[in-house]
Image (cartoon, rainbow, N blue to C red):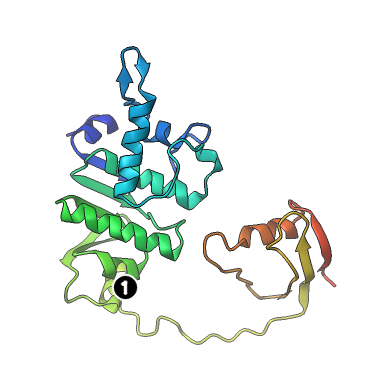
């Protein structure tokens, strides 16, 4: 049994958390080697730290400057640093908790390439996800939990999505997407030609929200969904357009 996270790391067990665990005010390479800096005499060996970080990034095809301050990077870049950091421990087991939650499709494919490299080296991967397509792309074996209880551990071969979902919910689902009738009411929010003052990508946005309706704003990481909502609520200043609430 391990008595600390440090002891687990020293024995080859590394984890990539869903919530980022980085120091935003420090450089990428500082974060990579936090708590285990290479030293030269009494001082941190900055050159070795840079070269070691760059070597790992080159091996994983990660295009990030090791000297960049973490706070200037995108969330998806920070996630790649977390993955590279786990890789740097030469881990025998890597636990990944929803690692694609903030990645674009291209970055997800890149991550899967890294995972396959780790697998080829004999590293075991515990991949925690609710995204079925990822499970079928990556996994050899699947463990299903429900309400905190172990339900089953089986080879993925021979299982299909319906069987997995049935084990997850505890019953067969004959109709995953039942027909629904919804009759939206009057318009309660009307947005016309909304344009952000300092965000060029938010331009000429228009939509209506009706009573009894759920309006979804969808897009990949970096699609500026949050920026639209921040402009709508006045966090970002608008340059033009109208927002009408309750007519």
Q: Is residue 166 visible?
A: yes
Which of the 4 image quadrants contains residue 3? top left
In the figure, 66 relative to 111: above or below?
A: above
Q: Is residue 181 left or right of residue 76?
A: right
In the figure, 229 relative to 159: above or below?
A: above
The front one of 72 and 231 is 72
Q: What's the residue at 58%, 63% (across, down)?
A: 223
Q: Quadrant of the C terminus?
A: bottom right
Percent position (x, y) of residue 17?
Answer: 37, 46
User: Could you classify mark 1 by the number of other residues whose Cα lies within 10 Å: few (under 14), some (14-19), or many (20 or more)?
Assistant: some
Q: What's the residue at 34%, 52% (across, down)?
A: 61
Which of the 4 image quadrants contains residue 246? bottom right
Q: Is residue 81 left or right of residue 157?
A: right
The front one of 185 and 43 is 43
Q: What's the residue at 28%, 33% (across, down)?
A: 5
The front one of 157 and 148 is 157
Percent position (x, y) of residue 75?
Answer: 50, 50
Percent position (x, y) of residue 109?
Answer: 36, 63
Percent position (x, y) of residue 239?
Answer: 82, 59
User: Which residue is labeled 1 in the image?
Assistant: 165
């Amino acid at each position: 049994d391990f008595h600390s996270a440090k002891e687990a790391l020293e024995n080859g067990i590394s984890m990539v958390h869903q919530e980022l665990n980085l120091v935003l005010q420090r450089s990428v390479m500082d974060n990579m080697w936090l708590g285990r800096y290479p030293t030269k005499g009494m001082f941190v060996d900055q050159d070795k730290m840079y070269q070691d970080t760059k070597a790992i990034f080159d091996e994983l095809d990660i295009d990030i400057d090791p000297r960049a301050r973490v706070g200037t990077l995108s969330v998806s870049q920070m996630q790649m640093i977390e993955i590279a950091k786990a890789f740097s421990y030469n881990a025998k087991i890597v636990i990944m908790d929803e690692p694609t939650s903030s990645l674009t499709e291209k970055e997800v494919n890149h991550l899967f390439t890294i995972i396959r490299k780790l697998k080829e080296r004999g590293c075991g991967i515990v991949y925690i996800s609710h995204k079925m397509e990822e499970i079928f792309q990556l996994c050899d074996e699947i463990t299903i939990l429900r309400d905190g209880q172990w339900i089953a551990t089986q080879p993925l071969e021979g299982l299909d999505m319906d069987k997995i979902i049935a084990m997850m919910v505890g019953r067969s689902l004959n109709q995953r997407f039942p027909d629904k009738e919804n009759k939206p009411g009057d318009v309660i929010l009307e947005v016309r030609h909304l344009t952000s003052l300092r965000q060029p990508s938010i331009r000429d946005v228009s939509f209506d929200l009706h009573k009894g309706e759920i309006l979804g704003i969808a897009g990949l990481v970096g699609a500026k969904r949050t920026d639209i909502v921040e402009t709508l609520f006045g966090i970002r200043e608008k340059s033009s357009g109208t927002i009408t609430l309750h007519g």
